Image: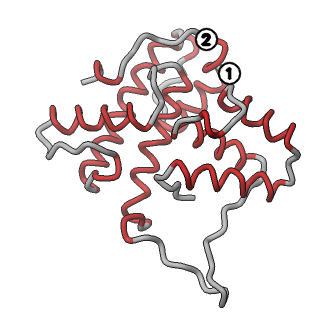
Amino acid sequence: MAYPVSIKTLITKIHIAKGQLGLDDDLYRAILKEATDKTSCSEMNFAELMMVLHSMEKRGFKAKAPTNKNGKRFSRPSDQTAYSRKPQDKIVAIWITMQRHGFVKDGSETALDKFINNQTRQTGMFAVTSLRFLSPQQASKIIETLKKWHIREMTKALTPHEVVGVMPYADLVNHFNNMFPGRDSTHPRHDIDAEDEK
C-alpha cells in the first residue's frame, strides 16, 4: 500500500487495523511495544508509526480504498498518485530498515528530510526540504544513494564467511535480517549520522 504522509492519518490507519484484526487493548499495546518499544501512538514519530503499520500488515491487516455513500472509490489526492508516491514510499522503507539495522541513528521523517536536503544540495540537484517535494528523478537518485550506503554498511557488518557473493539489494537485506535477527534491539547502534553520508 502507499503510505500517507500525515502522522494523524497513520495513527488513524493503525486504529483501523486494531479493529480489523480484533485486537484487545493488551495485545494492541504489546504489538506497539514489540515494534517500537513504546505503548502509545501519540508518543511515536513518523518512522515508528510506519513500523507499527508494517507489523499490523504482517498480522493480516488489509487497507481498503476509501469509498463514498454510493460505494464508489475515491481518487487519490493529486499529490499522492501511484506514480508520485511509490518512490517516496521506497525511500521511507529503506530509511526505516537502515535505522532498524543500526546504520542510521534517527529514523524520523525529520532526519530523512534533512538527509534529502543535504543530498540534493550537494549533488547539484535543485535542493528540496522534504521527501514530498522530490521530483521522480531526484527520488530515483536518493533511492540509489540510500541503497549503496545500506549495502556498504551491511557488507562491512557481515564477516567474510557470512557474505554470499554478490546479491541484489532486497536479497542482501533478507540475508542480513537472517544473520542478525533482532538487530535493532540486541546490537549496539553504529555511530553513523545521515549528515555524514555524502
Q: Which residue is mark 1?
A: 182
- Secondary structure at badge 2 equals loop
Q: What's the amino acid at mark 1?
A: Gly
Instruction: Return the x and y of residue 171 as percentages of the image width and height.
Output: 55, 36
Residue 196 is marked as: none
Residue 187 is marked as: 2
Q: CA distance from mark 2 to mark 1?
A: 8 Å
Residue 145, located in which quarter of the rendered image? top left
- Secondary structure at badge 1 equals loop
Identity of the residue drawn at 24% across and 37% down: 117
Q: Quadrant of the N terminus?
A: bottom right
| Image height of 114 relative to 63, above or below | above
Q: Residue furthest bottom?
A: 70
Q: What's the amino acid at mark 2?
A: His
Q: How many marks?
A: 2
Of 25 and 195, the residue lying toward us: 25
Q: Residue furthest left?
A: 124
Residue 127, located in which quarter of the rendered image? top left
